Image (spheres, rainbow, N blue to C red):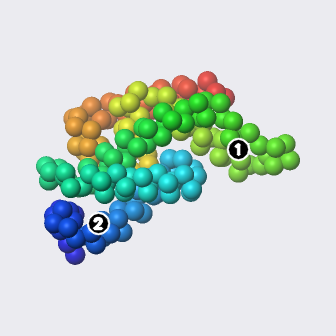
Amino acid sequence: MKTDHELIKIFQNGNESAFDDLVRRYLPQVYGFFSSFTGNKMVADDLAQEVFLKLYKNLAKFRFEAAFSTYLYRIQFNLANTYIRRNRWRNLLHLDQVPEQADFDNSQEIGWAKTELWAAVAGLPKKQRLVVMMRISQELPFRNIAGILEISEDSAKVNYQHALKTLKTNVERIK
């Protein structure tokens, strides 16, 4: 099996099937992140597709200075931040979450709790938000998070702890 860097070099030399191999390798991870992040399979599908479209357009400029996974995470989390900014009003107003009286059940309540949590995450400062998203959605170790964000591992841990404290306060305020 070829490494990511080998596939990128092959792609940069004009063989587009190498890009297909990268997509097959990373699509489950990217889709899984957006699926847990949005709670909506169609939105997750669209966002994952957008990640790979951006990757396709920019892979020719890849400089091999970092691991491909780091490059992909950056695209993924930049898109997640864009999604949060675009949909902040919807998260705050919850217009798409209002159930009809007869439809209220426990599963709807669980969905609301997840929406509330991600809305609270969206309100965090950018660095804290990124650390929380990577730690919770991708289950990345702090060492990897630090490398992706170009911060120290201790800084990643501190940002995570501050974010958890803020989230706990905000979620308790909602109750």
Instruction: Please indicate whether residue 94 sits to the left or right of residue 136 in the image.
Output: right
Disc 1 and disc 2 in contact, CB within 8 angstroms: no
Q: Is residue 51 placed above or below 4 in the rendered structure? A: above
Q: Is residue 12 placed above or below 64 in the rendered structure? A: below
* Numbered-mark total: 2
State the SS at label 1: helix
Locate the C terminus and report the quarter of the image it occupies. Answer: top right
The structure residue drawn at horizontal position 38% and vertical position 30%, both measured from the top left corner, is 126
State the SS at label 2: helix
Q: Which mark is residue 109?
A: 1
* Amino acid type shown at disc 1: Glu
Q: Which residue lies furthest to the front in this view?
A: 14
* Amino acid type shown at disc 2: Phe
Q: Distance between the residues labelled 1 and 2?
A: 41 Å
Q: Which of marks 1 and 2 is nearer the N terminus?
A: 2
Q: Position of residue 7 (x, y in %)?
A: 21, 67
Say which of marks 1 and 2 sits in front.
2
Number of other residues with Cα within 10 Å of mark 1, as a class: few under 14, some 14 to 19, many 20 or more:
few
Residue nearest the observer in this picture, 153 or 95: 95
The structure residue drawn at horizontal position 38% and vertical position 52%, both measured from the top left corner, is 51
Which residue carries the number 2 mark?
Answer: 19
The structure residue drawn at horizontal position 20% and vertical position 67%, both measured from the top left corner, is 14
Does residue 149 show up? yes
Does residue 25 show up? no
Q: Is residue 36 placed above or below 86 in the rendered structure? A: below
Residue nearest the observer in this picture, 97 or 152: 97
